[in-house]
Image: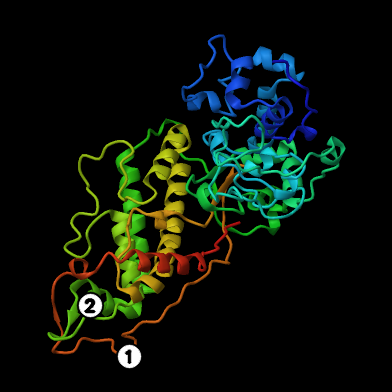
Amino acid sequence: MSMNQVDSPLKGFESPWSIIEKIKKANVVNSRQLLQRYGPELPITGGSIISKKYLSLWTFEGFDHQKLTQALGYSLSDHTEGIKKRLTQMFPTYIKSESLFRDTLHFCKECMKLNYHSLLHQFKFIETCPFHLCALDSECPSCKKSIPYLLPRHEYESGFICNCGECINNQDVQQHLVASLTLKDPNVIAWLSLTEENIECLQKTVIFRPFLVSNLNLMEEMINLVQVNTDEVHYSSIFDLNIDVPNRDTVEMNYKDIYLSLAKTLEAFEKHLLCTTLKKHQHCIKRFVGMYKRRDEKFPPICPYAYAYVFWKESVYHINPFINEGKRYTHKNIKPFDLPFHFFEEGFKELLMVFNRSDYRMMKWILNHLLWEVASKHFNKWLTIANQYAKLQIRPLIDSSYKETDTMILFNLKKKKMLKYTNDETLMITTYCPFESKPTFDPEEISFLPMRLAMSKGMSEEKKAAEKYLQGLRILTTIR
């Protein structure tokens, strides 16, 4: 099989998926036949399932790079690495660049009409096509299933086809129409136009990995971080590294000190919560945990504030607050990287490892400030959930997606000062308390079974209704 040539990728942004699908379409071949011709010396035999590693569009292990380069006239691997570097070089090195791209195909219908797909569409922080400014699709228009961002395994001898056999594109287009595409999204243009000084500044930014999961405005916030004048940006807190501390460079990592410091921060936050948001709901918490009600009364109503607090605490400390709290954390036998909490544990441990050889004081400052902010936003998330689940009188799954966060906190090093970026636009969640006019217990109300034993896990229909409700109540909190 000799390869019919396809035109060069548009200004470096075309994805390898798009390029290979064009090759398959032009040569009327499937993925297996392409790999047999341009793959390693040991060909993939017919009838067997192609190993996933050979289908990767990042490593190109299924291809012989020299053969493919000779056929295309350029290195597909170098082309891909070039785009990846332009999009991710401004992130700190501990964040792997491939983790910032989607593992399922996201595409623009208008671009697909041109037999074109861009790696910009796969970047997690781009939600609209930067060329057409329309929303990206993530499902096959026919079977409504997602398409893995891999070389397709199916046997169809053509390109741009889903596993179900449906064409994702619908026509052949002259290449000059594709070449006429221009970037229109101002954020993408600004992101790709960052100067070396801007990039170096952002590489010194501390980013908490869980914020990368669901935070769609990270790109815009990072652009603002370097483009807005320092005097015009609101810093919620500043740590000055210029302050001289005796023997600062010889201070070793004290994991017990870090552990107890973070424990005190959580204790302080919980006290703050009970003295502010939950000040008028102390009796609601006691009523919820102890299932206080009259003897012949049905399942009592649940105060959303109490619901949020109790499940927030279970999520944070990984304890059963209905039976007994137990020891939230220990003061003995503390091991390296131990934490006094359970939520977002891996994200904090990663930062501990990253900061292992950094300034010890700065590391403690960052981790404690981050913990306070995350605990606060996490409680707000639970209060949003409680608005619906408390009414349904069902309990959530603690280890579910409720542990994700929509917020963002950035720490950036500038001129020997570590700056914490926040803003004051946090949405304060309020809800109705069924005991607002009844702040005390009646003499006839007594405690029955622990509420957790009495609460249902909920029917699937109830769960779906609650999830639908939550989708309309996303907490949009950003921190600049």
Q: Residues within 10 Å of mark 1 (few under 14, many from 20)?
A: few
Closest to the observer, 421 or 177: 177
Real-space Cα distance between discs 1 and 2?
Answer: 15 Å
Q: Is residue 213 left or right of residue 261?
A: right
Q: Where 331 falls versus 157 (above or below)?
A: below
- The answer to whether 448 appears left or right of 125 in the picture is left
Vertical side of 369 occupied by 71: above or below: above
Name the residue furthest top. 41
- Can the viewer see residue 242 in this picture? no
Contact? badges 1 and 2 (CB < 8 Å):
no
Q: Is residue 443 visible?
A: yes
SS at mark 2 in the image: helix
Rendered location of residue 276, percent (x, y): 39, 74
Image side of residue 38 versus residue 210, left or right: right
| Residue ID at (30%, 77%) | 302
What amino acid is labelled 2 in the image? Arg
Residue drawn at x 84%, y 35% as measured from the top left: 175
Quarter of the image with the C terminus is bottom right
Name which residue type carries label 1: Ser
Q: Which residue position is annotated with label 2?
A: 287
Colour logic: rainbow
- Which badge, 1 or 2, is on the more N-terminal residue? 2
Pointer 2 local density, CA inside 10 Å: few below 14, some 14–19, many at least 20 = many
Secondary structure of the residue carrying numbered label 1: loop
Up the image or down, 63 lies above or below 312; here it is: above
**Closer to the camera in the image, 441 or 225:** 441
Residue 437 is labelled as 1
The N terminus appears in which quarter of the rendering? top right
Q: Looking at the picture, how far across and down is residue 363, in whole percent? A: 45, 42
**Residue 428, horizontal then vertical, whole percent:** 49, 72
- Which numbered dot is residue 251? none
